[in-house]
Amino acid sequence: MNMQQIRAIAKPMDIRTSRLSKINLIREIQTVEGNNACFATKSAYDCDQHECIWRDDCIVAAKKVAAV
């Protein structure tokens, strides 16, 4: 999902999107939704949330974060 699509999800939630990275913006959305802010964390590898809209991006981002 690109940033424009993510911002469109965040806007009705009144989340300020400027200056937030993709990872932090998605985590903020997760928090506002009442979910764990787990995007791109170590828990991505053990995630059982197969219906999560962030899942594909999450696993890719978690690999990038782990490589740093």
Image (cartoon, rainbow, N blue to C red):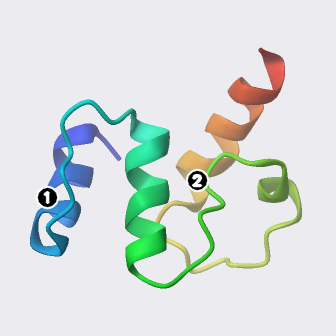
Residue at the right extreme, as displayed: 46
- The residue labelled by disc 2 is 56
Few, some or many residues within 10 Å of mark 1 (<14, 14–19, 20+): few
Task: Name the residue: 77% across, 56% down.
Answer: 44
Task: Name the residue: 63% across, 73% down.
Answer: 36
Q: What SS does tag 2 mark?
A: helix
- Of the pair 42 and 32, the residue shown nearer to us: 32
Amino acid at the residue labelled 1: Ala
Q: CA distance from mark 1 to mark 2?
A: 19 Å
Amino acid at the residue labelled 2: Asp
**Which numbered disc flags the more N-terminal residue, 1 or 2?**
1
Quarter in which the C terminus is drawn:
top right
Residue at the bottom extreme, as displayed: 34
Task: Name the residue: 35% across, 47% down.
Answer: 1
**Within the image, what quadrant is residue 65 found in?**
top right
- Of the pair 22 and 48, the residue shown nearer to us: 22
- The residue labelled by disc 1 is 8
Left or right: residue 23 versus residue 19 is right
Task: Name the residue: 72% across, 39% down.
Answer: 62
Instruction: Look at discs 1 and 2 and give the one toward the viewer.
Output: 1
**Within the image, what quadrant is residue 66 found in?**
top right
